[in-house]
Image (spheres, rainbow, N blue to C red):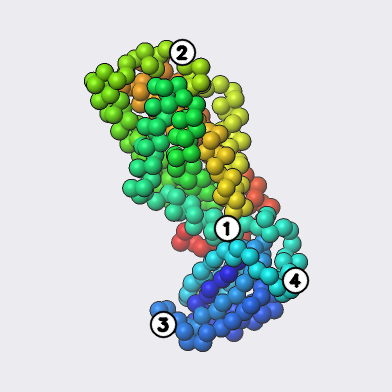
Amino acid sequence: MHLRLVVPGGIRDDVVGFLCHDPRVLNVAILRGAALQPPGDVLLCDVAREATSDVISTLRKLGLDEHASIAIQDVDAMSSAAADRAEAAAPGSPDDGIVWDIVLGQARADARPSWAFFTFLWLATTIAAVAVITDSAILVVGAMVVGPEFGPVAAIAVGLTLGRASLARDAVRLLVTGFVVAIAITTALALLARLAGWIGAADVSDPRPLTGFIWAPDRWSVVVALLAGAAGVLSLTAGRSNALVGVFISVTTVPAAGNLALAFALGVPNEIGGAAAQLGINLLGMTIAGCFVLAVQRFLTGNLELHTSR
């Protein structure tokens, strides 16, 4: 991991001394007087990934957090003997290294409302509704991949586990608002399609061999939600974002929202409760599993100091 530090003169010597004597740190460079706002020196260094949180925690104890800033950047590859020695000095595997500041920063971004989030969620919900009407498993998978709902779910888990109540509240608010908006828009579109004669109640109430599971949760819904939540949070902390695609395809959140919207629009009350239960089970299961995984990782990595304003 690459760190860029803005260091005021009063603590510069302590910070430089720590970085230069820590075997897990390499490529330490200083640009004296380069920072203008806030004023100070700019320090650059690279740190073994699995030691990054520990190094940043020590820098905060030296007073860096109070007077300046720390920027963190992932380095895709580095080839040098010094890098190999730094990795060897840091315990554990780089793939297991968790940079808690990055996890917290990503969670804050995922809890922030945006037009992109609302648009993707209602598009995914509407695709899921079409999947229900056509009984298409392929469209169900497509809707799952398009849906962005796991971001706020992970942010809730991060907020609860790391003691960031405001973060958890913001993520819950975004998730609830997002699904309410998505279901409302999809319901309105379904009503228009009903008025146009495109769809009817039979399209939802008739047997659907490929998509009937959407509104019929069972014990396996709980199991899959827990496993998917654990895998999703683990992929975020380990920097394996490609694994999230599997998580998106595993959980029946967006499809349940699409089924729920159709049940409202077409007057199929017996599917409303099942679809709502499926949606709630998956969201709650992912959150619980995410909190558990984060708590275990937090315990194993130690109670490292994080930025208090976050």
Secondary-structure class at tag 3:
strand
Mark 1 highlights which residue?
100
- Hey, what amino acid is under mark 4? Arg
* Crowding at mark 2 (Cα within 10 Å: few <14, some 14-19, many 20+): few
Instruction: Point out the frontmost of discs 3 and 4.
Output: 4
Residue 157 rendering spot, x and y as whole percentages:
53, 45
Q: CA distance from mark 2 to mark 4?
A: 62 Å
- Residue at 37 percent of width and 13 percent of height: 202
Mark 2 highlights which residue?
207
Mark 3 highlights which residue?
36
Q: Nearer the viewer, residue 2 or 279?
A: 2
Q: Is residue 73 left or right of residue 17?
A: left
Q: Which mark is residue 85?
A: 4
* Crowding at mark 3 (Cα within 10 Å: few <14, some 14-19, many 20+): few
* Crowding at mark 4 (Cα within 10 Å: few <14, some 14-19, many 20+): some
- Hey, what amino acid is under mark 3? Leu
- Residue at 55 percent of width and 34 percent of height: 250
Q: CA distance from mark 2 to mark 1?
A: 47 Å
Q: Nearer the viewer, residue 8 or 220?
A: 220
Q: Is residue 93 depicted above or below 206 in this figure?
A: below
Instruction: Point out the frontmost of discs 4 and 1.
Output: 4
Q: Is residue 85 left or right of residue 100?
A: right
